[in-house]
Image (spheres, helix red, strand yellow):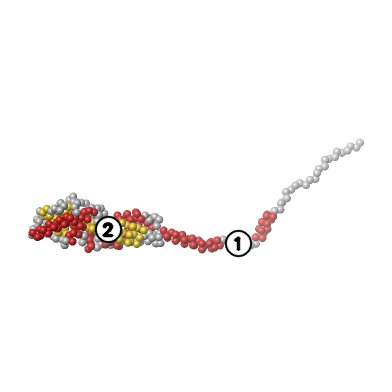
Amino acid sequence: MFRRKKSQPRRSHTTEYSKQPVFSYRSSRKGQERSFDRGRAEVPKKRNTGWWLKRSPYIICALLLLAVFFRSFLLDTTAQLDIVGSGAYLRDRDEYQASINDKLKSSIFYRFRPTLNSEKLSSQIESQFPELQEVVISVPVFSHRPVVEFVVATPAALITSNNTVYVIDGDGRVLFNQKDAYDSSKIEKLPLINDESNTTISVGKPALSSAQVEYVRQVYLQAAAKNEKVSSIELQPGGTEIRVRFNDAPYFVRFNLNLDARQSFGTYFAVSEKLKGEGTTPKEYIDVRVPERAFLK
């Protein structure tokens, strides 16, 4: 018998899968560009300077405005000096001017309008020059130059202490040494008080009270009205008595600073005229320290 052969299982003829390249436009494009760029040199990119050129006028204008703005706050170191008062001759104007300019240069804060401390600067100037009653500092809106105004005290008398002559004002405040005066010819005409009270005198500090200075001034005025010449005035210890010599007389007159100067001088002048009529001269003094009375010695 014939046996049927067992049929072998049919194998499927499947083609083995292989990964195929995928077409990409980007990759193809880059390849093409590389192939085309091989034959030409690479050209450097140009910098974009058009932005600066187009805006340079605005930048320049901004810088100019900034410079003008900064300059508006900057102050000059040379001040304009205005001197007010009859005592303007006390010092040389150039001395005042040089001192102000040096102080403006001494601090960076004095160089700018917002940081200028006028009160501090005024105080420094007044400390250096006691004859100044007031110092006013201002800066005009449309100017870079500070304006400094000096109000100078009016000298009222001279006072001598320890062989040194000082100038005092109406309040009795010591202004400065007479030898430092710019024009001493006008100061020499002031009443001269010889201080015998041994009081310590310092520049810038009061040596007499305003009442004492006014009393001495009234004695001078009354004497001038009667054609009497004041030869000397001595302030005695205690500060309540002055001894005055008139017309170089051999005697002096004792005045009480607590009384009325005009009334006391009137008493002295009446007694003096009476003594002249009698041909009598006091040996030492006439005392008018008691109101409406006079004592002779």
User: Which of the pair 288/180 is nearer the observer?
Assistant: 288
Q: Would residue 145 be found to the left or right of residue 291 on screen? A: right
Along the line of sight, which residue is nearer the eye, 40 or 243? 243
The residue pinned by badge 2 equals 153
x%, y% of residue 140? 38, 60
Specify which label sits upstream in the sequence, 1 or 2.
1
Question: Which kind of residue does numbered mark 1 sit on?
Answer: Val
Residue 222 image point, x, y percent: 18, 59
> In the orientation shown, which residue stands out farthest toward the left?
279
**In screen coordinates, is 269 left or right of 89?**
left
Quarter of the rendering containing residue 91: bottom left
Q: Is residue 148 visible?
A: yes
Location of residue 242 (image quadrant): bottom left
- Is disc 1 surrounded by few (<14), some (14 to 19) or many (20+) residues within 10 Å? few
| Element class at badge 2 | loop
Rendered-image quadrant of the N terminus: top right
Whether residue 91 can be seen here? no
